[in-house]
Image (cartoon, rainbow, N blue to C red):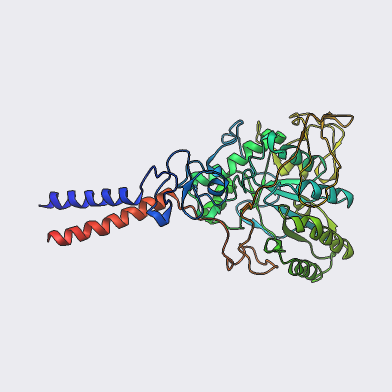
Amino acid sequence: MRSTILSGLLACASLTHGLLTKRAAQSGAACGPSAGNTVCAAGLCCSETGVCGTGTAFCGAPGCQLSFGPACDGNKSPTGKDTSSVARPLFGSVPYGVDVSHCTVPGKVAITFDDGPYIYTTDLLDILKRNNVVATFFVVGANGGKGQIQDPATGYPAIIQRMYAEGHQIGSHSWSHQDMSTLNAQQRHDQLIKNEIALVDILGFFPTYFRPPYTRWNADTLTDLKNLGYHVLNYDIDTRDWQGDYTYAQNTYSSILAQRGPGTSSWIALSHDILDKTVHGFVQYMIDQAKKQGYQLVTVGECLGDPPANWYRDPNSGQPFVAAKQGVAQPGGSTSTSSSVPPKTSIVATPTSTSTRSSTKTSSSSSSSSSSSSTSLVTPTAVATPNFGAGTGNSTGLVSGSGPAAATAAPAATKSPSAAGHLTHNYVLGLVLGLSAFAFLL
């Protein structure tokens, strides 16, 4: 009798697991948690609204649900050498395993841009160059349906090369802008390693600075990031430009800068280069206000007193990256005379948008400051109604303390439950049904 009951329980649990984890749903079928954890068939994506299909509306990151859509942009991998086995020694004085929200060098403002590059980023680089200031870009590998950043056909490799050539700092913002606190260990690993592979393909090295999308993470995420040698970068001014209220953004930014003088304070400001009005208006405002109040605009590495070599990791040795271009200006305004990993050949990119664009073209040197290479002209194209996942978990402009911002504003990301979570959930439900069967047998 006991064996019969046990068999009934196991069969019931197995049946429940099968019902709750349906596989190979076809185009147009429901998928995801709202459809009993149904997974779409190979080649299909599970949209943010839980429907199987193809195309950017279904597959674009971060909306596509990774656990239920095999063909989600976030599940695809860039071509290039896997960086998983690269040594990850921890170097420099900037801490690991915690979030860094504040500068340590007074008198500095580090303007940071998340979620790009996009069609406005070249104009932003032009503006920064005209103002003789530098910034930090936390780049995403494949979000908003814009294509993969290392693909020459997108035009983004040249934009990222230009960022580096003009002294800006490049950090990672994940492969497809997923909420790291909702991912399982393998998905978190993929989000970091895939972006590294893409950036090594573009630059020859990868960053040691990472900003989690939506500034959300959990203890496991911090541990993973430390093990992979990443500093976790937060901010203490959230302009919330992604909400489109630029009066609020300006008031927030200027009032926080005015709280304390540059003699004793410094700031890390968050904004987004995927937004037209941020690039063509708000950026100049931020520059002007910082200069007006006596601040110097720098990269996050500089405002933390971190030498430029520590901002990047050599994919061969795992050590701090030593720039290869002899006599060429390096991040932070220094000049390198070393020769290690050759930089990638540059291509010129001129993104387009609805407003008037500068025709300035910049070409990075392939071997020295006296020789440059422009091999093709590639124009990134706008994505119709893109979802880049811009947003934060912060409800106010000023972020204080050492932890993540209070999560009072819901992130735009679609939660991607872990595989372990699916199994546990299904097992519990199976157990409940099994116990019901047990009660019936009694």
Is residue 3 or residue 263 the one in the foreground?
Answer: 3
Query: Eyeballing the image, is 11 above or below 263?
Result: above
Residue at 36%, 53% in the rendered image: 424
The quadrant in which residue 33 appears is bottom left
Q: In the image shown, does 154 or 150 lie closer to the viewer? A: 154
Specify the quadrant that holds the C terminus. Answer: bottom left
Q: Residue 361: x and y, percent?
A: 84, 39
Q: Is residue 322 visible?
A: yes
Rendered position, 255 above or below 312: below
The reply, left or right, for residue 220 in relation to residue 212 is left
- In the displayed structure, does residue 41 sit left or right of residue 178? left
Q: Is residue 366 left or right of residue 58?
A: right
Residue 423: give x, y in percent of width and height. Answer: 36, 50
Across and down, in percent, residue 97 comes to 60, 52
Residue at horizontal 75 percent and vertical 69 percent from the top: 252
- Count every numbered label the image shows and give the total: 0
Residue at horizontal 44 percent and vertical 45 percent from the top: 27
Seen at 61% across and 53% down, the residue is: 387
Where residue 353 appears, x then y in whole percent? Answer: 76, 49
